[in-house]
Amino acid sequence: RDSALSRAYQGTLVTKATSSSDALEGALRELANGTENLSYLKSVLPRYQDDPNLDAAPIHTHIVDDSSFMELQGLWAGFLYDSAIAAGLSACAAARTDVEGGSGVFLDGAEHFKAMATNVTFSGATGSVIFDPASGTREATSATFEVVNFVEDTVFDDGSGTARFNAVQTDLFQNGEWTNLQPVTLNDGTSNVPPYLPDLTVNPNYFPTALRAVALTLCGVIIILSLGFSTWTHINRTTRVCRASQPLFLHIICAGVFVLGLSIIPLSIDRGVASDRGSDIACMAFPWLICIGVSATFSAIYSKTHRINLVFNARQFRRVSVKPKDVVVPMFVLLSLNVIVLAVWTALSPLRTKTEVLAVDLFDRAVQTYDYCYSDGMLPYVICLGALNFAALFLAFYESYQAKGVPLEYSESKYIFRAMACMMLVCFIGIPIMVIAYENPSAFVFVFTGIIFVTASCTLLLIFVLKIRTNKTNESLSTASSTHGSSAGSSQSTGVRILSHQKNKNKLAEENRRLKEYVKASLRNLDVADNGMEDEEAAPAGIRRTPPTLAISVMGEKTYLDESSHD
């Protein structure tokens, strides 16, 4: 009585087919009690075909003589009765006697089935028997069903601790309608229906507010830096440092980093703050922003450095004019290819927000999920975009290496290399973490945001901070030089200034010394003796034994080097 099986069985319900057995049972009892009826049944029971005496007693007489003959045998008695009646009625409807060359009654299976499905309808032991003309099966609404409730008999006690359950009919389905006969007794002994299943609590693993705040803050820092450096470039566009650094490409670098920073915004959007449609739009906006930003930034660095290389690697004594439009073609080609791939991706197989189940409860319901962006055909597009932008990164590396000997005033190759080294280090550490934490959306977004922030900030700071410092240094040197020139009252332009090449004083002084020795050696080699000029007083005007001022023309500007200006 107190076993787990007994407790589980209490209040169970079973739905089963049933039949109206009272009328059938009475008719069968009346048939079994009639002597004439029994004699007829014995006469039609089958006999052994090889019995020489066909008038012998039927072999199945013991069935009729059994005391249980014509008693209902379980649930299926009514259905068996209706099946026999349906087969007989359909046989009568399908039989025919007009068979050529034969006598008697004939029917075939097809006609028999057709007659049963279309012509047979009657009220049987199990209700109204109606067949579906299309399939030949019985229509479920024509059968009779009941709901049986098993309830423990609390009065029963045989002293052995055994529990007995009564089968109580609570509902009946007849003539296409359900009828409630009495309330259901459930497991707790009451009729109070509990919830179908326990309340479901799902953890969708949406981004926490703190993470979204950090991501958007880093995005704001990138935007402020890019706009600030772009503004500085515009204000100082006429200064020597900005003109030598090519303001057009500096603006493009700022714009590329600006777009790269904006990619953090869709990265931080999920269904916790946006609708399904908004989340899908954010999924596809992210590759657009990050690819356009990366390609614009690195292609601008490539074009800027390539232009410097064309000028400084030109043959000596040859005037070289390289305009921005001559080197921006690779940049526009790369941007165009990125746009084409992204447009095809968006049109044919756009990214959508997909929900992945991480854990389920006992009823196989999802209790922990996470969302990510996915499309069935995304891999080819990712590979194409990765190859294009990796090519831009490689070309920027190559041009920076080629410009290693160019003065830092015109090319920041050393600092560009440092920025890219930082980016590579962050990616080397961050990308494996992103792969490992792919099923943890918060960790994935945090690492990806960090990679974007480091890439953008290193690019801007290592390029522009140097230029701002150099610009301030040149302004100070120009002011000091102008003051020195006016106090000396000299009309000569010697000792005006030296451009800051970021070299230490000792190295610059050594370079000055070598230049002076070169000039002295050149003067000594002049054919002074052939003209009878053995001393300084005999030398023609314009030739001096003292080292002259050396003027070096670079990009249309003159830089003067002499012993009076070592810094």
Image (spheres, grey):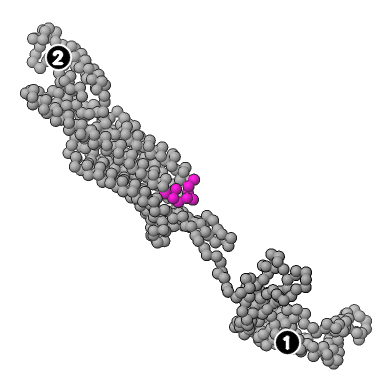
Which residue occupies 26% across, 28% down? Answer: 502
Look at the numbered disc 2 and give the secondary structure of its residue: loop
In the drawing, what numbered circle is on residue 22? 1
Type of amino acid at the residue the image marks with label 1: Asp
Q: Is residue 362 magenta?
A: no
* Foreground of the two, 348 or 76: 76
In this rendering, position of residue 441 left or right of residue 412: right
Look at the numbered disc 1 and give the secondary structure of its residue: helix
Which residue occupies 17% across, 26% down? Answer: 497
Residue neighbourhood size for the residue with mark 2, other residues' Cα within 10 Å, grouped as few (<14), some (14–19), many (≥20):
few
Q: Residue furthest left?
A: 489
x, y percentage for residue 120? 67, 86
x, y percentage for residue 141? 62, 81
Prevailing secondary structure class for the magenta stretch in the rendered image: helix
Residue 176 quadrant: bottom right
Residue annotated with mark 2: 546
In this rendering, position of residue 283 left or right of residue 82: left
Which residue occupies 22% across, 17% down? Answer: 513
Residue 505 quadrant: top left
Q: Tell whether label 1 touches label 2 (CB within 8 Å).
A: no
* Foreground of the two, 244 or 179: 179
Residue neighbourhood size for the residue with mark 1, other residues' Cα within 10 Å, grouped as few (<14), some (14–19), many (≥20):
few
Mark sitting earlier along the chain (2/1): 1
Q: Which segment is the magenta one?
A: 436-445
Q: Quadrant of the N terminus?
A: bottom right
Q: Nearer the viewer, mark 2 or mark 1?
A: 1
Type of amino acid at the residue the image marks with label 2: Thr
Q: Is residue 441 magenta?
A: yes
Residue 325 in sight: no
